[in-house]
Image (tube, grey):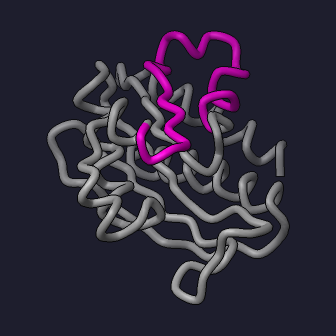
Amino acid sequence: MMDKIEDLVESLAQIAVNRSIRVATAESCTGGWISKTLTDRAGSSQWFECGFTTYSNEAKHGMLGVDSQLIEQYGAVSEPVVAAMTAGALARSNATIAVAVSGVAGPEGGSPQKPVGTVWFSWQIQGQPAETQRILFDGDRESVRKQTVYRAIAGIVERIAD
């Protein structure tokens, strides 16, 4: 899977440089892994703006401006919260596009409504509404997080490619 992720990052880099696109991340369950993966590529400073690692609810509120009431009402792993995370990342950076992830990577923490492997994604291009997706991944904590990194980057590429 890491080779596929590296290939995606290479595609993202080429498109972003050619179109002067800047990328921001807002991560919870991946703990900065998306940002790390993007910046593993030499030259990423040309297109990677910043990463917000907002693991706690307080960080989501303080760093990204996610309304505490949204978190209280829907939970951190929810569509409204990830959409607010991308909006916050764009508002607090010079990025053109932001991706946000929040999920239950396990092994504990799942519920019948949000079982382990549940991840919410949001992608938002500056000036456009957020696009969200919920995926239920199989596997252990490492696998869920790795699949989340892949899907987050793939989603960016899908939205900026022709």
Residue 140 is left or right of residue 162, and the answer is right
Count how many numbered circles sit on residues in the image.
Answer: 0
Q: Nearer the viewer, residue 129 or 57?
A: 57
In the image, which residues are magenta? 34-58
Task: Identify which residue is drawn at 68% across, 37% down.
Answer: 33
Q: Nearer the viewer, residue 14 or 95?
A: 95
Q: Nearer the viewer, residue 73 or 100?
A: 73
Q: Where in the figure is residue 9, as x and y percent of width and height?
A: 64, 34
Q: Nearer the viewer, residue 85 or 94?
A: 85
Residue 125 is left or right of residue 109, and the answer is left
Residue extending furthest toward the left: 127
Q: Where in the figure is residue 107, as x and y percent of width and height?
A: 79, 67
- Up the image or down, 67 lies above or below 73; here it is above
- Up the image or down, 29 lies above or below 73; here it is above
Q: Tell me the quarter of the picture where residue 7 sits.
A: top right
Residue 34 is left or right of residue 69, and the answer is right
Task: Identify which residue is drawn at 49% across, 53% down.
Answer: 155
Q: Where in the figure is residue 120, as x and y percent of width and height?
A: 48, 64
Q: Where in the figure is residue 45, as x and y percent of width and height?
A: 53, 10
| Residue 39 falls within the magenta-colored stretch | yes
Task: Identify which residue is drawn at 47% across, 64% down.
Answer: 77
Task: Identify which residue is drawn at 62% across, 10% down.
Answer: 43
Residue extending furthest toward the bottom: 112
Q: Tell me the quarter of the picture where residue 64 sits.
A: top left
| Residue 144 falls within the magenta-colored stretch | no
